[in-house]
Amino acid sequence: MNPLEQRVAALEERFDKLEKIGVFAVYKDLQMQDGVNVQTGTTTGTKIGTGTTEKVGFHGITPVVQQGALSNLVTGGGDNDGTARSRCNAITAVLKAYGLIA
């Protein structure tokens, strides 16, 4: 077997092992070029982050853990305007934490 055939055989062996593991760990940045899309399955869906303590961030914002639950939205009676403003501000804060809005 020549050196090129040996390298190909070694790579095939590594890929066979990776396929059996079922997990691909990336230790460097994953860069996608323009026009490349991420396609997902249509049966069970796809998760980004599988635990509440895993951090996610978008558009250059420092990643954060899952944000806490917001209290119930506005209900009848009382100061609805103040309550609605408070809820809107809380939602805005969560969206900013993830980098989804500026």
Image (cartoon, rainbow, N blue to C red):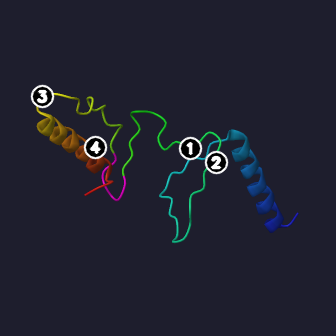
Dot 2 amino acid type:
Gly
For the C terminus, the quadrant is bottom left
**Alpha carbons under labels 4 and 2: distance apart:** 28 Å
Circle 1 or circle 3, nearest the eye: 3
Upstream in sequence: badge 1 or badge 3: 1
Dot 1 amino acid type:
Thr
**Alpha carbons under labels 1 and 3: distance apart:** 41 Å
* Tag shown at residue 46: 1
Residue, x 74% and y 57% (percent of image)?
A: 11
Q: Position of residue 5 (x, y in %)?
A: 83, 64
Q: Does the CB distance between marks 2 and 3 fall below 8 Å?
A: no
**Alpha carbons under labels 4 and 3: distance apart:** 25 Å
Return the residue at label 2. 41
Residue, x 31% and y 37% (percent of image)?
A: 67
* Tag shown at residue 78: 3
Upstream in sequence: badge 2 or badge 1: 2
Using the image as rendered, state which of residue 55 and residue 93 is in the foreground: 93
Q: In what element is the residue under mark 3?
A: loop
Return the residue at label 4. 94
Residue extending farthest to the right is: 1
Q: Is 66 situated left or right of 12 in this image?
A: left
Q: Does the CB distance between marks 2 and 1 fall below 8 Å?
A: yes
Residue, x 72% and y 46% (percent of image)?
A: 19
Q: In what element is the residue under mark 2?
A: loop
**Mark 3 nearby-residue class (10 Å; few <14, some 14–19, many ≥20):** few
**Mark 4 nearby-residue class (10 Å; few <14, some 14–19, many ≥20):** some
Using the image as rendered, state which of residue 31 and residue 85 is in the foreground: 85
Upstream in sequence: badge 4 or badge 2: 2
Q: Is 1 situated left or right of 56 in this image?
A: right
What residue span does the magenta drawing correspond to?
58-63
**Alpha carbons under labels 2 and 3: distance apart:** 46 Å
